[in-house]
Amino acid sequence: MDREFDVVVLGAGPAGEVAAGRLGEAGLEVALVEAHLIGGECSYYACMPSKALLRPAELAAEVRRVPGLTVTGPDPAAVLARRDEVIHELDDSSQLPWLEQRGVTVVRGFGRLDGERRVRVAGDLLTARRAVVVATGSGAVLPSIPGLSESRPWTNREATTTQTVPASLVVVGGGVVGVELAQVWASLGSRVVVIEGGPRLIAREEEFASEQVEAALREAGIDVHVGAKAVSVERESEVTVELDDGSRVSGSELLVAVGRRPATQDLGLETVGLEPGSSIDVGNDLRSKAHTWLYAIGDVNGRSLLTHMGKYHARLASDSILGKQVEIRSDGALSPRVIFTDPQVAAVGYTLAGAREAGLDVRAVDVGSGANAGGSFVGRNAPGTARLVVDESRRVIVGATFTGAAVAESLHAATIAVIAEVPLPTLWHAVPAFPTRSELWLRLLETYGL
Amino acid sequence: MDREFDVVVLGAGPAGEVAAGRLGEAGLEVALVEAHLIGGECSYYACMPSKALLRPAELAAEVRRVPGLTVTGPDPAAVLARRDEVIHELDDSSQLPWLEQRGVTVVRGFGRLDGERRVRVAGDLLTARRAVVVATGSGAVLPSIPGLSESRPWTNREATTTQTVPASLVVVGGGVVGVELAQVWASLGSRVVVIEGGPRLIAREEEFASEQVEAALREAGIDVHVGAKAVSVERESEVTVELDDGSRVSGSELLVAVGRRPATQDLGLETVGLEPGSSIDVGNDLRSKAHTWLYAIGDVNGRSLLTHMGKYHARLASDSILGKQVEIRSDGALSPRVIFTDPQVAAVGYTLAGAREAGLDVRAVDVGSGANAGGSFVGRNAPGTARLVVDESRRVIVGATFTGAAVAESLHAATIAVIAEVPLPTLWHAVPAFPTRSELWLRLLETYGL
């Protein structure tokens, strides 16, 4: 059946959902095409289950820091059952009412571009009067290591949805996915090994963040190999990975978490002159540089592979389609980001090294993130650092990193300060309440010398 | 012995300490006069012990919201021991090194003004070349209810430092001190009654905050009497309070928490033409309107009875004494503030009603403070509200209130937005990280209609 819509959105992950919903709310006829689950990778196989799995151990650690309470657990069966609840047992029906209320037509099936403003879903042709929005996300990269693909490796999908706790797990890749899931399974009883080819874990963040997360993984009994590359893999009953230093590690399962690639291989990009498998290059209005009717939002444009940034893209692209002038102001490596390990790592804008590479005249100030009265009560004695990276010429914050117990909710203050370019002398009048850990802002400003 | 200093600071609570330390750091000769404990009311009898006492129950409630963990406690003996550790068993020696490092001379004794730039401490005369800073804080008000003063009532001092859990406690006053300490002792096993003469608890905050805190107190088994005035008190073995509706409540202890008065009764204010017992009226540079050499910071100036505001005053007054132009930008009822009950109440700027009374053209937007993905993991299913009060003419936030589990650290983002007057369209680009509860900002902006 051939149908016409104002907008056809390909992919119903967080970015696609937000775009479709926002356009539907504005009264446009919108088709949202999804081959798998409405809600996308994030809801079922990434952000949501990993946080459900991380939270009990994080909370148990906090209880152990506060005298007067006794905690037992986490109980793996209960944690896995809660994870199943969070991912709705891979059933996406609870996602539908929100879309229905906004008049969005959900089209189940695999959508492919078929020339300008045309999308094929199996035998059906969907034509878009105004725009096609590609929001198909990304998939895990499997590197070409001899024996790897034959060894039934896990990606984030299996590692977040497994129904049993693996006796042991080898994690290849010490980025965000690798460190979060290493900590998950160690907390639930697995023996875990992490192999990172680069010089440090979570290498895009400040070095102190890498050091503190590595220390936490080691303290949890995780065997961390940094600067070690997997050169071959073999599965018998266990999986064995040979490293480039000649050593071998093995486990009952192997998780590969070395990166993501845009899910554009089989999208029909070639029918509109674009390169299948590549990310779709967009301008600051999220519109394809090649076609005015084509938008790409979320992971698929390669700018910032984070759910909240995909949703931000979705708002901007929708507003652009609705005729507003839009321009992205938070982007790429400077996007706000949180790693939900314990210690958490929450950052926005530049790292110190990143700012220097970008040629900025910056100075960093550091204080303990819990080194204040609030830290006596929440995250007591837990290690952590708060760093501001200050542009000396303008006296504004261009980067902030907070590590420590439960720092995730502290990030947004920094994000506002960075985006609004609030001058440091003004921040001095934003008084943190006593005794909250937000008084780290006082210590930072004092250390800076205000 | 007569001595001369650049600055004499009266009172070594948080405000006095910060002023003395900041002036000492700048190289001035500073005397800090304290009759009781360096660290002040906050450190020993207010903010610090109350938070130490509240935290275990708050955390236990959070554990009960997260499947997979089992918690027992709080154990009163362990909680009281931790409280003793937090208040250093009323020994202030740990406060001294910070002052010594800054060259501050601590003078033990009760300081009184004795004319211009002169302070008497027992037989000694301290003369201040530049300024005297009064930072003597406030004391609990005991209202003139027949029988009250003879009934050995507790103020915040006894209620935060008692070595035993009272079997039952009558709390007169449903403001911040009353609700926090009611929740403390109920969580540790006391039978608690709260009597509030006004129409609602924590009456300076949004009505929804009052309702949610009242509901939480009731759920904890606390008997709450709102709109009920104590008319007489009698102590036999128990204390019995008669209310104006004729009913009687009784308990083993009685806490009076109906307000604070500035500690200026016995300060020698009359020697410089000021009124003993009154707050010291200051301008926007924290300087007395009557004398250029006299500053008053913290509770004693009556502007904002909060530790963090006293420390803010201290920074401003110190900078003024050091010759900088200063002007207070966060003040009075608009100051940032947190009530550490569960649910917490964190607010800055105007309430909706307050903004309207001030004649502002405002609109409020409300969302559930935990009604987002982050709320699945932290504060799961706990009630709470996030409200922004938006000045429609300027499209800036002039007030924000967050209630719910662990919202205290979320306040600072709003404080920055309010103080820096960040326009709403700019806030739209400050993307909260997924899945943090800070996504309440998204919901608020969407609800507002951006």
Image (tube, coloured by chain):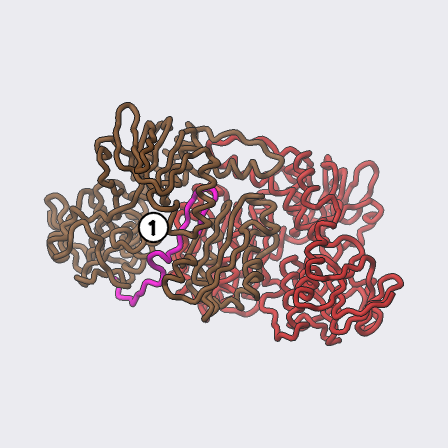
Chain colours: A red, B brown
Residue at the location (59% across, 53% down)? Answer: A338
Mark 1 neighbour class, 10 Å CA radius: few under 14, some 14 to 19, many 20 or more: many
Residue B416 appears in which quarter of the rendering?
bottom left
Q: A362 or A312, which is in the foreground?
A: A312
Q: A25 or A256, which is in the foreground?
A: A25
Q: Position of residue B244 (x, y in %)?
A: 30, 38
Part of the protein shown in magenta: B321-346
Quadrant of the image containing the C terminus of chain A: bottom left
Q: Position of residue B197 (x, y in %)?
A: 33, 43
Look at mark 1 in the image and give the residue it sits on.
B306
User: Is residue A41 toward the left or the right of residue B191 in the image?
Assistant: right
- Asked whether residue A103 appears in the rendered view, the answer is yes
Tell me the SS state at disc 1: loop
- Asked whether residue A214 appears in the rendered view, the answer is no
Q: Amino acid at mark 1?
A: Leu
Per the picture, the main secondary structure of the magenta-coloured stretch is loop
